[in-house]
Every structure is written in structure tokens, then in C-alpha cells.
Amino acid sequence: MTRTMSNNLFIMLITVCLVLSHRQTAAQPGMKKKYVGVSAHRGAMPGLPENTLATFRAALAMQVDYIEIDVRTSKDGQLFILHDGNLDRTTTGHGPLKEKTAAELRQLSAGKGTGEAYAEERIPTLDDVCRLLTDWNKTHQKQAALYVDCKDVLPAPLAAALQSYSLAGTSVFYGTDDYLAALRELLPAARIMPGLKSEADIDAKVARLKPYAFDVKWQALTPSLIKRLHALNILVFSDALDYFETKEQYRLAVQNGIDVIQTDFVQNVKEALLIRER
């Protein structure tokens, strides 16, 4: 069986499992549901190499609302998707990505640690991901958007790339406050999303940045904080990573009023959110 056929079968299997799970839980009587979006952290498909087209395709097949990407810049100014500053952990390369040219980066496998099936996966460029998402949205009713973690990229080339694919208006942008302020100068309508660790920081950040959303630290999520942000027309995203990746934590966040959960385990979140709260 070819790798392409294997990937397609894997995606089909995930989709069938999700549909069956929905049929088993969606019709429970006397139940109510608040819609909560799901963001696939680096693609978030167990067993698939993170931040690759393979994992993004699988995440899209799971009908996520966002795919999260980490954008970095090569030595010659090309934009690539990689979480770490160094290549060593997830690729066959070594050293900082920013010290390699685009041509050098394209020779590397991004499937390190995931077996021979993904040995040919490459570090995708931002253009690769934009094309994938644009093509997906053209052919599927369920639309997805980008959650852009601005790791090491100047605002101007990032804005230009997303504008060229008509994705600048639907993407959310996470980064430092200074970076997001600079990006807003280029994209006045940008959906910027600064981090929020404490309720005490809300007023200053809102006055300076006028954010679309906050990425709230999971431990800081409370009904009162979320209600306060909603009163300001600001959405609440949070990362349920590591030891917060439990169905009880997902459901508690939903009860508190969260808008988007970012996760490494999309299917677990989907299954938890299909069970309505009485």
C-alpha cells in the first residue's frame, strides 16, 4: 500500500469514528450544548509528525475550527512552519532554522520519530499551508482558519503572505504585545490575540491592543473572568495541554464559558464536547 493511500485511509477512519460517536451522543434528551471551537495544536494528531501537511490534513478531516502553526524565517527570508528554533527534535537537520536557506530546509525530513511512513514529509512553508487550507475551504462546508503563532517572523512578510491567500481576515495571531501592536499597524482589522495570565492585566492590554481574543492561561479560567471579557466582546481561547488534557477539564472550561480549546488531542475534546451538560 502506498503512503498516500495509507494517509487517506487513516483520515477516512478518523472521520467515520467521529460520525459514529456523534450519533451515539447527540440525541440524548434534555441536554443543552454551547458551541465551543477546537484548535489543533501543531496539527494535534497522535502518531503523525507535528506541523506538517500530513497532520494538518488529518486535523481538517476532524472538522477543527483552527489549525495552529508556528511561523519562522529562513536565512534567505522564506517563511516555514516549525515550533522549535532548532531543527534537531523534529527533523533530520541540525541547528537553528534561521541559519538555513530554503533550499537546505526543503531537503530535510520533518517526520523524525514517526516511522518510515512519514519519512518523506517536509517542513512546510507558510505558502504550503495556505494553499492546503484555501483548497479545503473551497470544497468543504465546515470552514477552518489559521491560528498563527508568530515565533520568528517580521509582521510585513507575514501579513503579505496571508493577504495573498485572502486568509488575513480570518486568522488569529498570537505573539508578544509589541509584535501584535506592530502587526495591527499593517492589518488594522487583524484578529490579534495576546496572552493573558492575570485578570489584573486586562485593562491595560485592552486599551493598547483592542484584541479580538485573549489566550488565557488555563489555570486562570474562571466564570467571572470569561464573563468580563465577553462583556468587552473579546473571545477566550486557552490551551488544554499536558495535565489539563482530560475530559473533566474540557467540560469545566465549557461550563465556565470558554470559546475555543486548543489541544494536542482533538478527538478527545470532540468526544467530551458531544456530551451535553444538563
Image (tube, rainbow, N blue to C red):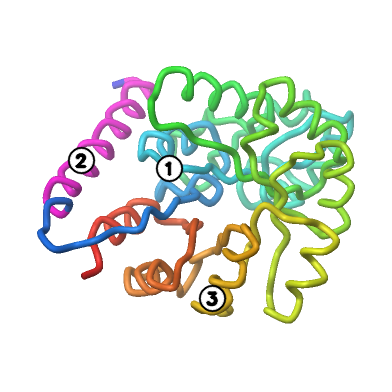
Q: Which mark is residue 101?
A: none
Type of secondary structure dominating the magenta stretch: helix
In the image, taking residue 71 as reference, residue 6 lies left or right, namely left
- How many C-alpha atoms fall within 10 Å of the one at disc 1: few (<14), some, or many (≥20)? many
Work out whether 31 lies above or below 10: below
Q: Residue 45 at x, y = what percent?
A: 42, 47
Quadrant position of the N terminus in the picture: top left
| Location of residue 88 in the rendering, given as x and y in whole percent from the top left corner | 68, 50
Residue type, label 1: Val
Q: Position of residue 112 (x, y in %)?
A: 55, 44
Q: What residue sits right under mark 3 in the picture?
A: 221
Say whether residue 207 is left or right of residue 1: right
Assess whether mark 1 and mark 3 are in contact (beta carbons under 8 angstroms): no
Q: Which residues are magenta?
A: 2-25
Kindly identify the residue that appears in the image at 64 percent across and 56 percent down. Answer: 213
Q: Which mark is residue 19?
A: 2
Q: Quick one: label 1 or label 2, which is nearer the N terminus?
A: 2
